[in-house]
Image (cartoon, helix red, strand yellow):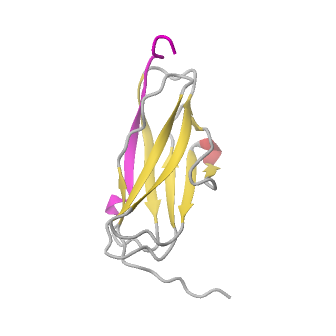
Amino acid sequence: MGSAAVRSDSDLEVVREDPDAAPPGGTTTVRAFVANRGPDTTASPFTVIVTLPDGVTPQGPYFPADCAVLRGGHEVRCVFGAGLKQGRSATALVPVRVGLDVRLGVLTGGSVEVRSPDDRDRSNNRQPFDLNVVETAAGS
């Protein structure tokens, strides 16, 4: 039998970071950046959820390597172990491919979220991101 989970008083925060621009059919990486504002080190694992905008699909390999693709490719979930100290950060890397039929412009609807039983302040646990779809550079 397992023992009851120990909790800490941690404040995990998603820091907004838009991925680099990509052309239709091209790739870029969503960086899901999570910081621990403390005051405690996390005592429980935490989950980072990347929701992708329409027209974008996950394209592994991911970091951490055991990230799971869910909801028909619209979501990637990555679990980090306990032990993230106050003032430190963790980043999940989710490479993505922009669909060939996606129009040039800004794709909205993507987000990064963190979930943890240790987190007492959930007001900063989710941030949107935008992905700029641009023309392929000449000579590329």
Residue 98 visible in the shown view? yes
Residue, x 64% and y 44% (percent of image)? 72
Q: Is residue 41 above or below residue 61?
A: below
- Vertical arrangement, residue 85 with respect to residue 100, above or below: below
Instruction: Report if residue 127 lies within the magenta region.
Output: yes
Which part of the image, by quadrant, shows the N terminus?
Answer: bottom right
Magenta stretch? 122-140
Residue at the spot 62% in from the left edge and 50% down from the top edge? 70
Residue 33 belongs to the span the image colors magenta: no
Residue closest to the far top: 138
Determine the image quadrant of residue 98: top right
Which of the 4 image quadrants contains residue 89?
A: bottom left
- Image x and y of residue 7, in percent: 45, 80
Q: Residue 49: x and y, percent?
A: 51, 54
Describe residue 55's horizontal placement relative to residue 37 as left or right: right
x and y percentages locating residue 64 in the rendered image: 57, 54
Q: In this view of the protein, which residue sits in the foreground, 126 or 59?
A: 59
Q: Is residue 137 above or below residue 131?
A: above
Residue at the spot 59% in from the left edge and 47% down from the top edge: 62
Q: Is residue 1 above or below residue 41?
A: below
Q: Residue at x 56, y 47 (%)?
A: 75
Question: Residue 48: x and y, percent?
Answer: 49, 57
